[in-house]
Image (cartoon, coloured by chain):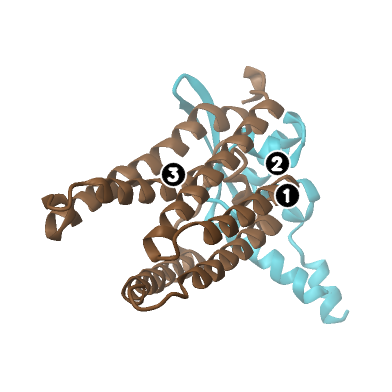
Amino acid sequence: MNEQLRAISELDRVIHEPGRLMIVALLGAVKECDFLYLLHETEMNKGNLSSHLARLEEAGYVEIEKTYRGKVPQTLLRLTRAGRVAFDQYRQGLKAAF
Amino acid sequence: MGRPKRYDNIDGTGEMAFGLMALGYTFLNYVQAGLPENSMWRHGFASMLLFFAGLLLMFGLILWVPKAIKKRITWPRTGYVAYRVGGKSWWTAMVAIAAVSVVIAAGFGCLMRFDRQHDWMGLLWMGAAALYAAAYAVWIYRTERHHPWKWLVLLFMALGLLAIALIAPADFVGLWRPMLLFVGLTWLGSGGATLYLYIRHTQPPAPEAE
């Protein structure tokens, strides 16, 4: 297998899914954001977004914090260090492949 | 990824902050110019004290107004974002801004000295206004393409600055005060219009959205 094809086969499948890639790309550009922001930007429905976030949390890429803004519940989300490293590697992998 | 950065001005607060800054500087300058000639607040240390007290108040306003709008209007509607501070690109931007500010301040200082001897001030200001309009056009192209009416704001701003350069007295003070006042009001107006459109086109989600 040549190097380019190998790079494609080695892409992180957790990040590679388009929905999760959108989430990771958005989180990669900020310090933290809330669930509502991701809902607005990705235009996913709540169920889809929640399941993608759960998958990313399970992989250790996203940290989810339940908190309150005043009396309103707020879900804060941020990429973990492992998430940032994985996203960087994913981008480098894509570059190497194409 | 540029989207989160563009989100910062989704409610027009970025433009409003610039507008408040320009108006703050103009206000401070008009206040000092309006004081009696022999007033201690117009000369030496006291004038600097007044200027820096005004700056402090202005920066407080610039930080407080956008944050209050975001807290009450933007975050409940389209979500909260905290941007990354630090890192190589952030520091590069900060150093670049500081360097440009120093160059601009030094340039203004030189202009104020030359002003007494030269009469090409109007031409110079028109050049500065043209540079400013070009920078504004780049900003619209990069971050506000989804608001085509911003190009009309640019046209309005360019024509207004040109008119001021032609009408106002061709000296440093005679030009920069009305120009800064005009730019500040236009930024504030444009930011206000963006906020109005944002409120009109977005609704807070149902409570279970969280």
What residue is drawn where x is 38% and y is 49%? Answer: B26
For the residues carrying marks 3 and 2, which lies nearer the camera in this image? 3
Residue placed under numbered mark 1 in the picture: A22
Supply the letter of whichever chain is brown: B
Per the image, label 2 sits on a secondary structure element best described as helix
Q: Chain of mark 2?
A: A
Q: How many numbered markers are drawn?
A: 3
Q: Quadrant of residue A46?
A: top right
| Residue closer to the observer: A89 or B148 | B148
On the rendered structure, is A78 left or right of B54?
Answer: right
Give the amino acid at mark 2. Answer: Glu
Quote the CA–CA distance across marks 3 and 2.
29 Å
Residue at (56%, 71%) from the top-left corner? B127
Are labels 3 and 2 on one chain? no
Residue A41 — which label? 2
Disc number placed over residue A83 in the picture, else none: none
Residue type at mark 3: give it.
Leu
Q: CA distance from mark 1 to mark 3?
A: 35 Å
Query: Does residue B29 appear left or right of residue A31 in this picture?
Result: left
Contact, CB < 8 Å: mark 1 with mark 2?
A: yes
Residue annotated with mark 3 = B20
Tell me the quarter of the image containing the N terminus of chain A. bottom right
